[in-house]
Image (spheres, grey):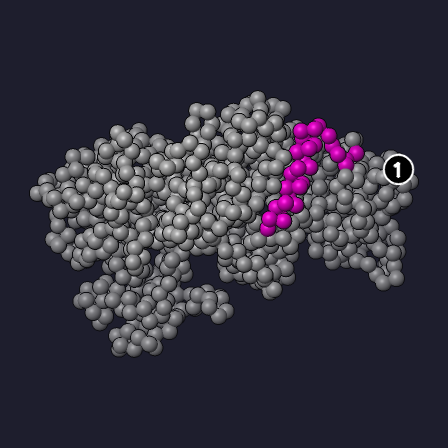
Amino acid sequence: MLNHTERVSRLRAMLRQVSPGDDLDSLPIPPPDQLGELQPLDTGDHRPGAVPQFGYNDALEGIRKLKEQRDDQVSPAELFGVEAIVLAHDRPAVFVRAGTYDQLGGVWSELDTMEMRNRINPLLRSIGRIELPNMFTVPYGGTGFLVGPGILMTNRHVARLFAEGLGVEDLLYRPGDALVDFECEVDSDPAQASYLTVERVLMIHPYWDMALVEVSGLPPVYQPLTLSVRAPEDLLNRDMVAVGYPARDDRNDLALQDRIFGGVYNVKRLQPGKVRRRVRVRSFENQVNAMVHDSSTLGGNSGSALIDVSSGQVIGLHFAGEYLKANYAVPSYELARDARVVAAGVQFDGRVAVTDQWQPAWNFADGRGGRRMFEAAPGGQAQPVQPTPQAVQPMPQQSGALQIPINLRITVDVNGTPQAGIQPTPEERAVGARPGPRPRAGVSMRQLTEMMRDPSIPDTELRRYFIGAPTLAKPFSPGVIPNPELVDIAEPRDIVEGAMAMSWANGLSRMRRQAAFQARIAAGDRKPVLVSEGDSWFQFPVLLSDVIDQLAGDYNVWSVDSAGDTLQNMVFDGAEYMGALRRNSGKVQAFLFSGGGNDIIGEDGRGRSVITQILKRFQAGQPAAWYIDTPAVEQKLRFVEDCYRRVLDNVAREFPELPVVCHGYDYALPGGGPGETRHPNWAAVDKWLGRPMREELGIDDPTLQRAIVHALIDRLNLLLQRLCGASYPSGLFKNAWHVDVRGTVGARWADELHPTDDGFAAVGGLFEGALRKALGGRDEGVAPDVREEVRTPNIGDDSGEQAPGQAPELAPLSSSYIDAARPWRLAKAITALREEVNRQAPNRNKASDGTIGDAAHRTRDSDHNPWIEDGSTGVVSAIDITHDSAGGCSAEKLAQSLQSGRDGRVKYVIWNRRIMSSYAHNGTAPWVWRSYSGSNPHTKHVHISLNAEKGDYDSTAPWRISV
């Protein structure tokens, strides 16, 4: 991030550049009525370090100081105002939608004319977003555009996310690893997206940051764009537009990005600017003479088409940019001078003389050398590695291929054995060879791969070869990469290289598990076989021992888990679980599934925090339940439920007796509050929960933050309870098991979302118990007539008052019931009450129904806990009944009928912020309502508790009630 002085200096240069007279005196200042959505405002956040409040006058004052050379006097608010108002006006970024682009106005009003739109609009549909369905650490790869029949052009650094090699021969690519979406507009529905498959990689240019790929199934409406053969020098100061998919870039000013882009990213935009004077910049190992332009581009613009608005031809391929300085592109003119590019079928507007200027690079790609990706060099720049006797050489019969040993691809052969896309050294081909002691320079990626495949090397020894990378972390996707100090790989220089390194860490972790599985099976290990699909609770690469690691001692687990995976990918876009089950058909005894967390508190397809979009902003005095009472939360939960239903239904259809074991996470602990002691090296301690709640929603109170997370986790677990019929009688799928891990981790959190090794061990213990039941057919610790009732979803339910000197209104907590092996049952009078309610309202909603207390109830006094002892069995003596007037069940009517009936079995009733006891309480007569001040207002359900005498709680006398 630039400091204030550097930022002011760059801003001055940029303002001069966009000024018609190349000076600040001629800088066009938009009047306030032209600012539209960028009207000056007060952010409402006055804390130190927050985004500065600014107004129109701040921008004017900032410009005046810059004109007067008083750079050191420009305040943060003035600096931000100049950037957010002037640059957004002069270099806007408008949406592309419905075949055209939004109104530009101002200095770019000429582009709003019908003549210009008729020229530019037909080109927009041929520019698409490159999707990476098998890489979960980045939302997409970049931009690409059609340049010939079925030929798409993008950047070399984008292509290397899914392909290996250099040049045109023997490039390594697996069809399906890259797709193209030619829509992905701000108004488009992701569920209706149509993807075209990249069938093969045609070229990865060895000099320019350019690659060509072949796309199949193109409808006729998608026509190639024509590339100009005019030299950049002839285009100086020409108006142009960049068309691509800008992504939020954490490396630069996020507040300014949000201001200019309106907080919406990853969708197609048109960004006008001008062609500037060429400069030489480093691109990979080369110093290239790049085209320069000044559009407002971001990271996802890699691969964007630069279009000359006067001709409608592509004049450049955007590949990089420097904040407030310049953007760089591969000139189409230079590509037209390369005979191999022309021969590949790229559509140019004429011909120019070819050059042999890049022949050394082509010789290297075609020839005999090798290089390591991310090769470190003095000053941190990439340099070619000269061939040596130890350098990686092309494999036999592959004279045109460049092998890149650390760009790891994991495949599974026909026998299911994991294979790495890496060739062994002659020494490693020797029978029984293992990687030797680590040399001083570190182990190679090949050696690290072999070590990961060797089950005799413990995880604790391997951990030192990996480090955390906090800037790369995403929710349920910790930033973990190979350690450059111990592994022969340079530290990633940008987001793309970082994403690749994270992908390797994920791939190595999966490969290690699958190799261990194969080795065990080959050795005749007869432990039960499980298949697992999940997120980072099931695969946290190397640095933590996750749930699957905890189960590995007692089970053979075929894992297709991946940190950062979402339900969208696991269930729809890149589903692997059914293939994994079929692969192990006849052996697999249970399927483990973990998903949903990333979909609720992760990032959406445009790079924005999900949790900040679904919760309400801070409002004093509101309880946690109020913050999650939003349509967005309900929509997210419906999506999660739909995904689980699809998984459970697919498994039940093909494997009708196979148990499916899932969970709804524990109460995650938002970070950054007072007394914070966690220091994860893979992510900022408050990155996913604490900081977004504080900075974007204004929710500063750590206690309130935790309560909101509790509420969300409870809703997720309630959803699973209603699906899991093996754990709950009312569940929809008879072979689905729910592992309720809430309250298990306690304080043992390594970061906001992931337990420590000890915390994961405790969670793993609960999975062990569930698997024993599922595989053994036993309902241990639960009375046969009820198994497990649906746990009450109501946070803070029946947390009442206790007057001094009086018997407690709520039951005292009994520690003995917490033992999971201790059986419990539902009071017979509670069963009779529920049956009567159901008889009177057979179609009622049961969303807030509940009996047995969850983990939160177990931490306090509650009649939802089985504290009453009937011999060796605990008894639950409370029930929650959902208020659903439309469905024929009015909680108000039920509560009033209990009051008028004065049934002696009732201890107390709570409804709509009131409580009524069957005994006198603190001066209030029996059966009289009084105010209730518990944390849950009881507006969605009525709570009924019974007396602790067996003659009351087990009485099956008819209930005289009305609903």
* Amino acid at the residue labelled 1: Ser
Residue at x 50% of width, y 61% of height: 695
Q: Which residue is drawn at 61% across and 27% down?
A: 526
> Which residue is labeled 1 in the image?
955
Q: In which quarter of the image is the C terminus?
A: top right
Magenta segment range? 756-783
Prevalent SS, magenta region = helix
The correct choice, above or below, for 427 with respect to 331 in the image is above
Horizontal relation, residue 22 to residue 628: left or right: left
**Foreground pick, 309 / 877:** 877
Check the image and report above or below for 658 versus 553: above
In-image side of 815 versus 204 (left or right): right
Left or right: where 537 falls relative to 305: right
Q: Is mark 1 on a helix, strand or loop?
A: loop
Say whether residue 154 is magenta: no
The image quadrant of residue 341 is top left
Q: Split into 4 quadrants, where in the image is the N terminus?
A: bottom left
Quarter occupied by residue 295:
bottom left
Residue 160 visible: yes
Q: x%, y% of residue 604?
A: 46, 46
Q: Position of residue 790 (x, y in %)?
A: 71, 38
- Residue 525 pos. (x, y %): 59, 28
Residue at image point 60% right, 60% down: 702
Q: Which residue is drawn at 61% across and 41% down?
A: 550
Residue 763 drawn in magenta: yes
Decide if residue 165 is on the left or right side of residue 290.
right
Looking at the image, can residue 194 be seen? no
